[in-house]
Amino acid sequence: MSMTDPIADYLTRVRNAIKAKHKKVDIPFSRVKEEITKILLEYRYIKNYIVIDDGKQGLIRIYLKYDEDDNTVIHSIKRVSKPGLRHYVKSTEIPRVLNNLGIAILSTSKGIVTDREAREFKVGGEVLCYVW
């Protein structure tokens, strides 16, 4: 069975693992998903991740981060651009998530970047998701 939106599947797996208080979650590998995971690690939304080669597609194992009261660091993770309705923005229209308390992840000509990096590079692109 083919998947129509692998990024939405990625975000849903992370969201479900957080709700179930899992320490880790396995996601089918792709380069876009790995780039999104690198951004989540860079902004300290996750503890760590590893790429597992299983001889097929591969897996990304994400270790989720919780605070000392066992509350998740990721409060919400939301898909913005969907296959049925793509959401593109100009460099001057890049959204601010919760007044810069969260991040927007964009797909641009410079690669997968955050809203801050896109403003710095002065490039627009497709808004993939919001994380806060």
Image: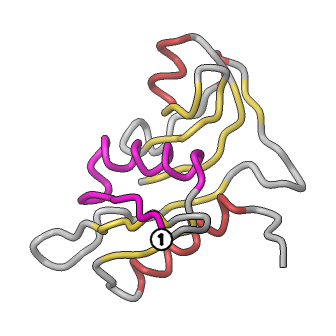
Using the image as rendered, state which of residue 118 and residue 59 is in the foreground: 59
**Up-down relation of residue 41 to residue 125 (above or below):** below
* Magenta stretch contains residue 112: no
Q: Would residue 84 appear left or right of 58 to someone viewing this image? A: right
Amino acid type of the residue that numbered disc 1 sits on in the rendered structure: Val
Identify the residue at the far front of this view. Answer: 55
Which portion, as a residue range, is magenta?
Answer: 30-53
* Magenta stretch contains residue 37: yes
Q: Quadrant of residue 1?
A: bottom right
Q: Would residue 5 appear left or right of 57 to someone viewing this image? A: right
Residue at the image position 42 percent from the left and 83 percent from the top: 19
Residue at the image position 53 percent from the left and 75 percent from the top: 13
Identify the residue at the far right of this view. Answer: 84
- Local secondary structure at mark 1: helix
**Up-down relation of residue 25 to residue 62 (above or below):** below
Q: Label 1 belongs to which residue?
A: 14
**Up-down relation of residue 29 to residue 96 (above or below):** below
**Badge 1 density bin: few <14, some 14–19, many ≥20, Cα 10 Å:** many
Q: Quadrant of residue 67?
A: bottom left
Residue 64, position in %: x, y?
Answer: 30, 68
Q: Would residue 85 appear left or right of 44 to someone viewing this image? A: right
Quadrant location of the C terminus in the rendered image: bottom left
Q: Quadrant of residue 74?
A: bottom left
Residue 128, position in %: x, y?
Answer: 64, 46
**Up-down relation of residue 31 to residue 100 (above or below):** below
Residue at the image position 76 percent from the left and 62 percent from the top: 5
Residue 112, position in %: x, y?
Answer: 56, 34
Using the image as rendered, state which of residue 130 and residue 41 is in the foreground: 41
